[in-house]
């Protein structure tokens, strides 16, 4: 079941992937009216960037990921932080139907998918999640900014040039974080019968060059991870190309797309935008 994002890749992910500001947690809690009786399922949880802070907003959080090394780091981090209401499950979107038997139907306040929806079958997942969700709960697809190499900033253009030199080919992957990806999310949620809403949280954050380099490697499978020598050379190339800078400012636009669970027989608009 492992995805190939284990080993050193999982370590890069834990150390260098950005987390979420409190405003994102507030938005999720408000969208689904999360409370002390709710369970939250974080599907494709990685090393717990979203699962762990969500534990403060719910009775329990279940982090689900197909990569054992990711889950091992998430579990260890939860223990280090004294978080006792998070549990970790080896699985994928294919296992969502089994969750109903595990936690009971209509007991989940939110199912979150953060920076992982491009690995999943949206239509199948959104339909399979319906029995899990209590009325007023729902699905949140979270896009945590743009990939580091596709942003509209000089440092991002420089990073992409270094990355293309290392790999020997153009780098255009956006991980479906663009408008086309958000359209796919929106249309699939509406097809599955959810009431659609969206919002965003925008902020500026410092980004160290080490986190920039590590963030690139966190997005590669272990199979495609360059040798340690080439990784070290890439880090030097990035530092030199940025003129010796140690830190830049990243403008992060966190997009949250909600599918609110409702009775299939209910009427009303399927599309509501919140700003």
Image (tube, rainbow, N blue to C red):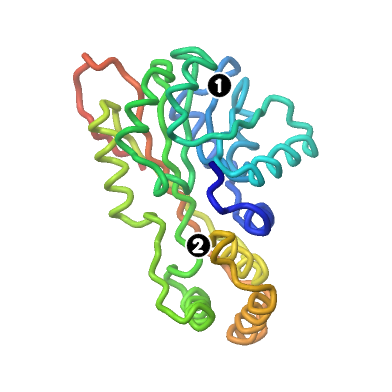
Mark identifier at residue 13? none
Whether 177 is drawn above or below 200: the answer is below
Image location (x, y in percent) of residue 38: 55, 19
Q: Is residue 177 left or right of residue 115?
A: left
Image location (x, y in percent) of residue 170: 40, 77
Image location (x, y in percent) of residue 93: 44, 35
Whether 6 is drawn above or below 192: the answer is below
Q: Residue at x 44, y 14 (%)?
A: 106
Q: Is residue 274 visible?
A: no
The residue where tag 2 is placed is 251
Q: Residues within 10 Å of mark 2 (few under 14, many from 20)?
A: some
CA gap, disc 2 and disc 1: 32 Å
Q: Is residue 92 visible?
A: yes
Mark identifier at residue 39? 1
Q: Residues within 10 Å of mark 1 (few under 14, many from 20)?
A: many
Q: Residue at x 49, y 73 (%)?
A: 156
């Amino acid at each position: 079941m492992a995805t190939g994002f284990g080993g050193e890749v999982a370590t890069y992910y834990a150390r260098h992937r950005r987390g979420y500001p409190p405003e994102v947690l507030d938005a999720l809690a408000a969208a689904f009216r999360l409370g002390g009786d709710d369970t939250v399922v974080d599907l494709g949880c990685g090393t717990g960037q979203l699962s762990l802070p969500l534990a403060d907003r719910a009775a329990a959080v279940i982090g689900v990921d197909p990569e054992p090394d990711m889950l091992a780091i998430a579990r260890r981090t939860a223990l280090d932080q004294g978080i006792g209401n998070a549990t970790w499950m080896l699985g994928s979107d294919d296992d969502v139907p089994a969750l109903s038997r595990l936690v009971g139907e209509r007991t989940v306040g939110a199912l979150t998918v953060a920076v992982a929806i491009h690995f999943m079958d949206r239509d199948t997942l959104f339909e399979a999640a319906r029995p899990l969700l209590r009325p007023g709960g729902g699905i949140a697809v979270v896009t945590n900014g743009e990939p580091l190499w596709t942003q509209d900033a000089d440092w991002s253009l420089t990073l992409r040039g270094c990355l293309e030199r290392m790999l020997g080919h153009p780098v255009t992957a956006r991980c479906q974080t663009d408008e086309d990806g958000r359209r796919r999310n929106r249309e699939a949620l509406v097809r599955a019968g959810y009431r659609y809403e969206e919002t965003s949280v925008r902020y500026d954050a410092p980004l160290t060059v080490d986190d920039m380099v590590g963030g690139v490697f966190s997005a590669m499978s272990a199979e495609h991870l360059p040798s340690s020598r080439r990784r070290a050379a890439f880090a030097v190339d990035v530092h030199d190309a940025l003129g010796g800078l140690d830190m830049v400012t990243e403008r992060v636009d966190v997009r949250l797309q909600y599918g609110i669970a409702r009775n299939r027989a209910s009427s009303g608009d399927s599309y509501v935008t919140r700003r």
